[in-house]
Amino acid sequence: MPQKPPAPSFEDLLDSAQEHALHLELRDVYAVGEERDVYDAFQRDGSVPADDSDYWSGWLPLVKRTVARGVKVRRARIVSEPVTDYIRFEHAITDANLRAGEQVRWLPRRRASTLALPGNDFWLIDDRIVRWNIFSGDGEVLEPDHTEDPQAIKLCAEAFRSVWDLATEHADYRI
């Protein structure tokens, strides 16, 4: 049986987007990994990385050039309340995502109980490919997966739309 090719990189995915790049985050805690220093600084004194810092060096320019082509980049986060320390960190750094052109909304998990959601975080690009972000139980990043299966695409598109419609704009979401 032939081996499935590796999942496309974020750069390849966003560079290929023509209409939209939709990201749904479902976890309350992600292992910090390469974020350790930035996360520790936030925990210590509430500081957040500058837009031109190494922390953002790959992501913000990618989002800016994607949005400049007219692609909508949307991120929705389903979170438990009260929020975890990691979600406080994400909330604090989200203004950089917004300045790059992302649209971000937050949905309290208690309001998502009746929604049909996939089992993993995902990126959906132009309703043609899904990139699953796979994590271990303690939030470590594992090998991502992807699919062009129409049923998976439909599930993700409907899930994202349902979450987006119920969620609160970042500027209005208080933690």
Image (spheres, rainbow, N blue to C red):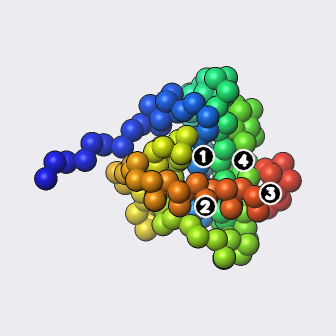
Residue 54 x, y percent position in the rendering: 56, 29
Mark earlier in primary sequence (2, 4):
4
The reply to whether dot 4 and dot 1 touch (C-beta < 8 Å) is no
Q: Distance between the Cα atoms at labels 4 and 3? A: 9 Å
The image quadrant where one finds the C terminus is: bottom right
Q: Nearer the viewer, mark 3 or mark 2?
A: 2
Give the crowd class for mark 2: few <14, some 14-19, many >=20 residues within 10 Å. some
Q: In which quarter of the image is residue 50?
A: top right
Q: In which quarter of the image is residue 63?
A: top right
Identified by mark 1, the residue type is: Leu
What residue would you read off at disc 4? Answer: 104
Which of the pair 170/82 is nearer the observer? 170
Count of numbered marks = 4
- Tell whether 45 sits left or right of 6: right
Mark earlier in primary sequence (2, 1):
1
Identified by mark 4, the residue type is: Val
**Local SS, label 1:** strand
Q: In the picture shown, does residue 59 fall above or below 125?
A: above
Mark earlier in primary sequence (4, 3):
4
Q: Which of marks 4 and 1 is in front?
A: 1
